[in-house]
Amino acid sequence: MEQIAMKTAEGKRVITKKPELLAPAGNLEKLKIAVHYGADAVFIGGQEFGLRSNADNFSIEEMAEGVQFANKYNARIYVTTNIFAHNENMDGLEEYLEALERVGVAGIIVADPMIIETCKRVAPKLEVHLSTQQSLSNWQAVKFWKEEGLERVVLAREVGLEEMLLMKKNVDIEIETFIHGAMCISYSGRCVLSNHMTARDSNRGGCCQSCRWDYYLYEENDQEVENGMTEMKMFEEDDAPFAMSPKDLNLIESIPKLIEAGIDSLKIEGRMKSIHYVATVVSVYRKIIDTYCDDPENFKIKQEWLDELAKCANRPTAPAFFENVPGYQEQLFRNHSQKTTHDFAGLVLDYDEETQIVTLQQRNHFRPGDEIEFFGPEINNFTQTVGTLWDEDGEEIDAARHPLQIVKFKVEKPVYRNNMMRKEAM
Amino acid sequence: MKKPELLVTPTCLEDIKPLIDAGATAFIIGEETFGLRLAGEFDRTAVQKTVELSHEHGVKVYIAVNAIFHNDLLPKLPEYINFLHEIGVDSIVFGDPAVLMNVREVAPSMKLHWNTETTATNWYTANYWGRKGAKRAVLAREINMDSIIEIKEQAEVEIEVQVHGMTCMFQSKRTLIGNYMEFQGKDLKVEGRSKDRTLFLHDPERDSKYPIWEDANGTHIMSPKDICIIDELEDMIDAGVDSFKIDGILKSSDYIVKVTSLYREAIDLYVEDPDKYSELKDDFVEKIKAIQPPNRDLDTGFFFKESVY
C-alpha cells in the first residue's frame, strides 16, 4: 500500500495523503460556495444523462464558468452522467462528452458501460469514475473496472471499512466513498419502485423516492383468518406503519479511519441541497480533515463540529454500513417531518469596516431582536441580536421579509463576502 | 421461423420432468448463496440431477450466480464455478463482474449470460458485455417492446426476455422486515421472514400488494402484478428474440407447469400458423386467468408502458 504519512524533523507524524473533499452542487452559485468553503472537488449534473432530473443542472456555458472558477482554487469539477441509458438516450451523447472535455471538466461519473466506452473514444482526456449506481461491492469487481481503464470507482453504499481496506490492498485504483447525506436504502441501480408506482424511471433520474413512503405489512394465508379474509395484519392499531426510510449518512467520527485507510475521495451527497447546507457540511469536514492530517496523534472530534453539522441536518443521521449492517435504529418510522433546527437567513454581500455595517441578501425572514449566527471560512462562528435594520436605500424597516431583498445592519465582528447568516428555526 | 427457447424456473427437482413434458427447453436454477430470487433452492445434488435429466431430453440448464457479491463470498466462487463446469451446466448467469473474473480463471470455456435485471437497457451495453465474454444479455423488465426489438436488431449476443411472472422492484442489503419487527418489539425467532411466509406490503394509495421477503441476499420487494404477454409474442418471435422466460417464483409447481404448457402451445401455434394464433390468443390469456392465484392480477409489465424521467 502507498505511503499516507511521514514523520517531521521533530518526530511528529503528519498525513501526507490528504483525501479529496468532494461536494455536490446543483447550480453555479452552489458550486462557487462549495469551493469557497473548502471543497477540493465538486460534482455537478448537466441537463442530460445524469440522475436528479429535478435539480437545476448546468448548461455547458455554466459548466465552463464553473470550471474557470474552480481552476482558480485548484479545485476539480466532475459531471454526473450516471443514467442507465435506453437506446434513445444515445443521441447527442458524443457531442455532450466532447463539450465536457472542451470546457475543462476533470472527469465524469458513469454507470453505463455504453457511456464509459463512448467517453474513452470521443473524449479521452476526461477521467472516468464508476458511479455508485453500479453497486460495486467487492475487490474483484473493482479489479475488473481497473482493467477496463477507469481512474476511480465510487463504492456501493453497502460497503464497510473492512471491505474498503481489502479493496485498497488488492487493487491500485482511486476509491471514492460517501461520507455524508441522504442514501438509497436499496442497492443503487437495482431499485425500480419508482418505475412501478409512478412510471418514472429511477435509473434515468426520475426517482420519486417511494422508499420514503409508508406501507402496511400483511401475511397472506391459505385459509381464512377472519370475516372471509385470508390476509393477516402484522401490526396493531397503534403500531407505526412499515417503513424503510433510512437515516442520512454521517461519518464525521470515522473520517480518521477513512484517511488512514488511504481512501482517495470523501463525498458529500446532495445536489438538490441549499447553499447553506453545502457551506455548513463542507466547512465542517474541511476542518476535520485538515486538523486530523496536521496532527493525527492529538486529534479529537470537537463538539462544536457535531453541533455545527446538526444545524443543517434535515433528517437524523447514522453511520449506515460503515461498521455493520444497520438495524432498525438507522431507519425512520413515523417520521416524515424534514425540519431543520436552523434556517439560512442571509448571505453576506459586503461589509464596511468603518461603519461595521453588513450588506446581506435575505434568504429567510428575520427582524430586529432576532438572535442570529454568522459563519464562514474566514471567521469563527459568532451570534448576536439583530439591531436596527435598513433596506437598500437606507430606509429603516421592521423586518427582512422579501426573498433576496438587500438589507443592512450593524454587526459586532467583521464578516466577509459569502459568509452566511442563520437563525434558529421557529 | 426460429422458435425461441422457453426458459422456466422450477421450484424443485420434482418439477423438472413435468416441465420438460410441458415443453420447457431450458431451466434456471441455483442456490440462494450465489443466485438471486430463485423459485426454489437447488443444492449440488439437485443441480447435478437436473443437469442429467435435462440433458437426456436436450433441455439446457443455466445456473444463477447473479448475486451482488461482497468480499466475504469471493473465496467460495472458484470452487462453485469449477463444480458447475465439471457437471456440464450449459451456462452461468451473472451480474457481478467478479463472477466474470473467476470464470475466466477457473472455467474459461463456460458460457455466460449477463443479467443484472434492472440495468440491461440498451443494445450497446448488451454488446459490451458480449465483448467481455457474455453469450447472452437478459433485458431489464422496465423497457418497452420497441426497445426490445431494437436491441435484438443491434445485438451481437443472444437476447432473453421475461414474458411471464413476477418481477423484482427492489433489493436492499438491510433486513427490513426484521428491522420493522424489532422496532415493534417482536421476537424474530418466532416471526419468519422467508419467502414461505408469503408476506406482502400493502400500498393503500395505489391499492397494490407487493410481495416481500428476506434471505441471504437481503430484502426483496416484488411487483404487484404478474406479467403475461402470451397474446403479444408475435413481434418478438419475428425479431428472433432468443429466449422467453417464465419466472415461477412464489408460484406452485402445478401453476408453473400449466403456464409453461400454454406458452409452449402459443409459441408453436404462432410459428406454425400465425393466423390461427391471432384467432386463439385471447383464449390463452383466459386460460391463464383461470389459474391465477387470488390477489395476483395479470398485466403487460412495461412492454406497452411509457416511462418518464
Image: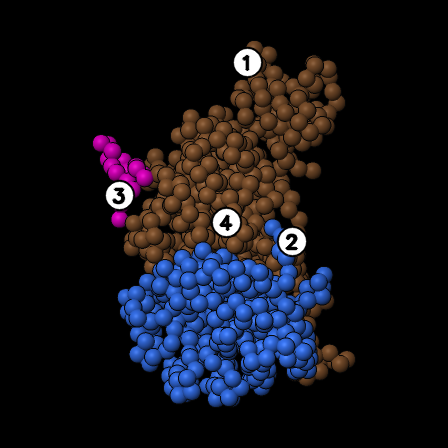
Chain colours: A brown, B blue
Amino acid beneath label 3? Gln
Q: Which of A147 and B288 is in front in this view?
A: B288
Rendered image: mark on residue A353: 1
What residue is shown with label 4?
A90
- Disc with the residue nearer the chain's start (4 vs 1): 4
Which label sits on residue A335?
A: 2
- The circle on residue A3 is 3
Q: Which residue is drawn at 62% across and 40% down?
A: A341
The answer to whether marks 3 and 2 mark residues whose Cβ atoms lie closer than 8 Å is: no
Mark 2: which amino acid?
A: Asn
- Binning the other alpha carbons within 10 Å of mark 4 as few (below 14), some (14 to 19) or many (20 upward) gives some
Mark 2 falls on what kind of element?
loop
The amino acid type of the residue labelled 4 equals Met
- Residue B170 seen from this side: no
Residue sitting at x 61%, y 16%: A357
The kind of secondary structure element at disc 3 is loop
**Pointer 4 indicates a residue of which chain?**
A
| Secondary structure type for disc 1 | loop
Q: Residue at x 52, y 67 (%)?
A: B239
Q: Residue furthest left?
A: A9
Q: Give the range drawn in magenta.
A: A1-17
| Mark 3 vs 2, N-terminal side | 3
Q: CA separation, marks 4 and 1?
A: 55 Å
Does the segment drawn in magenta span residue B248?
no
Residues tagged 3 and 4 counted as in contact (Cβ below 8 A): no
The chain under label 1 reads: A
